[in-house]
Each structure stands twice: as C-alpha cells, then as structure tokens.
Amino acid sequence: MPKETPSNAALEQINQRRAKTLSTIVCEAIEAMIISGELEAGDRINESSLAGRLGVSRGPIREACRSLEQAGLLVSATNHGMYVREMTLDEARSLYEVRGALAGLTGRLIVERASDAMLQKLRRLVDDMDVAASEENVSSYYGLNLEFHDLLVEAAQNPALEQSYRWIVNQLHLFRRRGLVQKGNLAISNKEHRAIIKALLERNLEAAESAMRAHVAGGWARMSAPS
C-alpha cells in the first residue's frame, strides 16, 4: 500500500517543532555570548548580524530574544528593539538574598547526597582556580568558577533547587564579573571555596551551610563595593 501523505496539520506540527528546536539553539548561543561578556549590559541586539553569524533567519532570533526577555536577560525598548538588560544594584541585591538562602540548602543537601567522587571533582576545580587566581587570570577563573557552582547544584540532586538557582544566576551574569576584577579578589573568592570544600569533605551539615552562605555574602560584598 502507498504511504499516506502527512496532513497539513501534521506538517504544521513538525515545522513548529523544528522552529522551536532552532530557536532553543539560538537562545543558548545568545545566552552564551552574554555569559562570556561578548554581549554586555546595554548592548543592542542586532538581529541581522546575529542571523548571519548563526546561519539562521531572523525569525528564530526574534523567538530566542522573546525567551531571553522572559528569563530576565534582555529588555525591549519600543521602536528600538532588544537590549541586554542593565541590572541595578537593588535588583542584584534582591537576587543575592535569595541566592544566599538557596546556597545554604545546597550545602546541606550535598553533604547528605553527593558521592565522594563528586566531592573530589569539586576539590580539583578549586585547585585549578588557585592557579588562575595566582595568575590574576579573570577569564579562566570565571569559567572555572561557573563550572564549580554548576557542579555544586548538580551534587545537591534537587531539580527544583537547580531550576531556581539557574534562573537567578543567569540574570546575575549581567553583573557578576565586576566583583572579580579588582586585584586580590580572586584569591579571596577561592579561599571561600576552600572553606566550602573542607566542610563538604568532612560531611559537616552546619559548616557546609554556613560556608555556602558566607561565600554568597562575600560575593555580594565584592560585587557591590565601589570600583
């Protein structure tokens, strides 16, 4: 028997899935540009330029921008397009307050749930950050720092916690680099990481929670300090 031709409705669904997948890929690409600092707060999103660079039409770019606006990374200006969001100090403070509470919970859950292998992986990242800090290599340290904190949340093994964490941290990428650029701050930040690792390796619930909260508080102090 000859194969049936897909209905118009079925074809439409397929096309929608393809478009959704493409816009998701584009969304992740633009988000990576913001995280890396290639796109900075206040930069205008040039749809034509991005479409050419990513090899897509402007449709997926617009769809991705709408998603990033909902995620708090972009803002729209009437008749002027999309811009990378400029975060105020008060907005960042609000996010850090919630992040501190989540960090404390993360520390406790890691103590209870993380494998020894995961803890050793985290320890090695702290060793690598020591090297970057000694060289005052902000870019290298920043990337390792992101990996370290992503692994901390993964080690907590709580999907709801991870979702909340990523919503907050994705927005803080707009602001966080400024807290690391002042001389000596990399070493201070990694000293706090050492305290976290020590508490985790000892499987000390209270110390892990305290060290995680202290690190977030320290990050806020460094970020909000006058340049």
Image: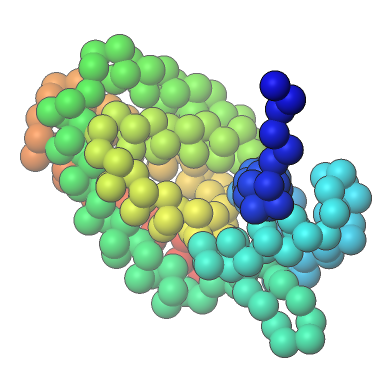
Give how far across and how far down residue 53 sits, in percent.
87, 47
Quadrant for the C terminus, please. Answer: bottom right
Give how far across and how far down residue 216 sits, in percent.
33, 52
Residue at 23% across / 17% down in the picture?
115
Q: Nearer the viewer, residue 24 or 10?
A: 10
Give how far across and how far down residue 184 sits, in percent.
50, 44
Residue at 18% across / 46% down in the picture?
105
- From the viewer's perspective, is residue 71 above or below residue 148? below
- From the viewer's perspective, is residue 227 above or below residue 32? below
Residue at 73% across / 38% down in the picture?
5
Residue at 29% across / 29% down in the picture?
155
Residue 34 visible in image: no
Residue 203 visible in image: yes
Most extreme residue toward the top, as rendered? 117
Give how far across and how far down residue 135 sits, in percent.
61, 30
The number of numbered badges drawn on the structure is: 0
Q: Is residue 178 shown left or right of residue 81? A: left
Quadrant for the N terminus, please. Answer: top right
Color theme of the render: rainbow
Q: Nearer the viewer, residue 182 or 224?
A: 224
Q: Is residue 95 shown left or right of residue 142? A: left
- From the viewer's perspective, is residue 171 above or below residue 85? above
Most extreme residue toward the bottom, as rendered? 78
Q: Is residue 192 shown left or right of residue 223? A: left
* Residue 119 in which image quadrant: top left
